[in-house]
Image: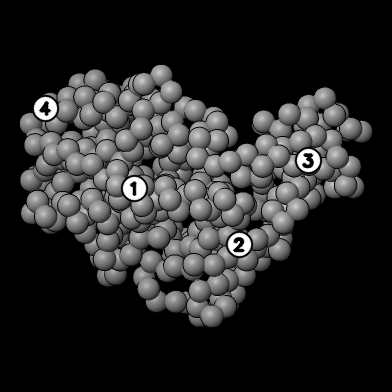
């Protein structure tokens, strides 16, 4: 059995992960990570409530709970990158960067400094260490989190455990309730951790300047004004402020394109408007979990957002760092800055950052 330090967040998933590890006979301790220092507008700090829940679980299981702040690392390695990407007109995924830089780097280093052999988290994913180290989808397809873990390395995975990988969310809540955890029905965290329940545009306005410009249709008709392209993303419907311009179809408007050079936001009507769909994409920062690049072209599946069903595609690798992805079925709202993640069967191969639709 191993010396394990579990990242205990105060939620039900990490609580059950700690429970299972202790039942399996591991020597278990826990760590609560504070990665964000700012409170919300009302002065409420959700980290305080989460820490109280984590302490209650640790006390219940009779395991030591360490508390550690990675706020400086998070700001420098995750949030600064997030702001830079937004300024460039892209839509980043800070959870992907947080896993790579904080949970499986800073936290792993911290845990090893405390004498841990491995770390554990409440992610819904599996690690196969039989013949070679492989990242596999979680059994619960609705909760599978491999999309957010695709930048990890085999070295990081070798030192990690995902106790919930074989369980469904329903089973996890039942285990928590039967164990008597007070957080068994606690609401799952959603969205970006540092934004919480706030609207994305309102939060971002505290860090990035507004730069108003035209909202135009595909035939170049101006129908409104936007606050700044940094506040919008491809496929967005809410917050456009053009509901009165019903046009010919009367359907809702969606963001089609962000022209950063001319500061123009292009929109079109209809959730399935043809301009929202692309047969492929170009991506950079290509990363393979195994570090061994497969022979190009690669026939595989991919997803361009969390929880999307995987899509059949062909991957052409360019210079080892970039790739072109052609999908069997055109994809809706291909978004620069987001990740495209590749799979073969149950295995997550790795991924890349979307540069543009093609």
The answer to whether residue 102 is seen in the rendering is: yes
- Which badge, 3 or 4, is on the more N-terminal residue? 4
Q: Residue 190 appears in which quarter of the rendering?
A: top left
Per the image, the residue denoted by label 3 is 215
Q: Position of residue 110 (x, y in %)?
A: 17, 52
- Which badge, 1 or 3, is on the more N-terminal residue? 1
- Which badge, 2 or 3, is on the more N-terminal residue? 3
Residue 74, disc:
1
- Which badge, 2 or 1, is on the more N-terminal residue? 1
Q: CA distance from mark 1 to mark 3?
A: 34 Å
Per the image, the residue denoted by label 2 is 355
Q: CA distance from mark 2 to mark 1?
A: 24 Å
- Residue 153 is left or right of residue 55, and the answer is right
Q: Position of residue 166 (x, y in %)?
A: 32, 45
The answer to whether residue 125 is seen in the rendering is: no
Give SS at disc 2: strand
Front residue of 276/260: it is 260
Mark 2 surroundings within 10 Å by alpha-carbon count, few (fewer than 14), some (14 through 19), many (20 or more): many
- Which badge, 4 or 1, is on the more N-terminal residue? 4
Per the image, the residue denoted by label 4 is 59
């Amino acid at each position: 059995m191993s010396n394990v330090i579990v990242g205990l967040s105060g939620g039900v998933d990490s609580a059950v992960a700690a429970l299972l590890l202790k039942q399996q006979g591991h020597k278990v301790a826990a760590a609560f990570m504070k990665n964000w220092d700012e409170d919300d507008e009302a002065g409420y700090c959700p980290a305080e409530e989460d820490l109280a829940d984590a302490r209650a679980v640790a006390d219940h299981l009779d395991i030591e709970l360490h508390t550690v702040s990675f706020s400086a690392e998070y700001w420098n390695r995750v949030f600064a990158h997030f702001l830079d990407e937004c300024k460039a007109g892209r839509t980043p995924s800070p959870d992907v960067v947080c896993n790579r830089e904080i949970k499986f780097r800073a936290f792993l280093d911290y845990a090893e400094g405390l004498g841990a052999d491995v770390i554990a988290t409440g992610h819904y994913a599996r690690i196969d260490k039989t013949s070679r180290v492989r990242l596999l989808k979680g059994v619960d397809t609705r909760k599978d989190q491999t999309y957010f873990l695709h930048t990890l390395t085999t070295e990081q995975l070798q030192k990690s455990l995902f106790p919930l990988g074989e369980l469904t969310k329903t089973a996890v809540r039942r285990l928590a309730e039967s164990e008597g955890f007070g957080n068994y029905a606690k609401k799952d965290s959603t969205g970006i951790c540092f934004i919480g329940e706030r609207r994305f545009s309102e939060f971002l306005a505290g860090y990035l300047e507004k730069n108003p410009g035209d909202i135009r249709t595909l035939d170049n008709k101006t129908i409104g004004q936007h606050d700044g392209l940094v506040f919008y993303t491809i496929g967005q419907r809410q917050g456009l402020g053009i509901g009165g311009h019903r046009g010919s179809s009367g359907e809702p408007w969606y963001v089609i394109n962000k022209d950063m050079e001319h500061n123009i936001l292009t929109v079109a009507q209809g959730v399935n408007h043809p301009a929202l769909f692309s047969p492929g994409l170009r991506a950079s920062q290509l990363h393979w979990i195994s570090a061994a690049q497969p022979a190009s072209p690669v026939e595989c599946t991919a997803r361009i957002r969390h929880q999307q069903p995987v899509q059949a595609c062909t991957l052409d690798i360019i210079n080892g760092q970039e790739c072109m992805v052609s999908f069997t079925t055109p994809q809706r709202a291909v978004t620069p800055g987001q990740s495209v993640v590749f799979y073969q069967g149950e295995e997550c191969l790795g991924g890349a950052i979307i540069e543009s639709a093609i």
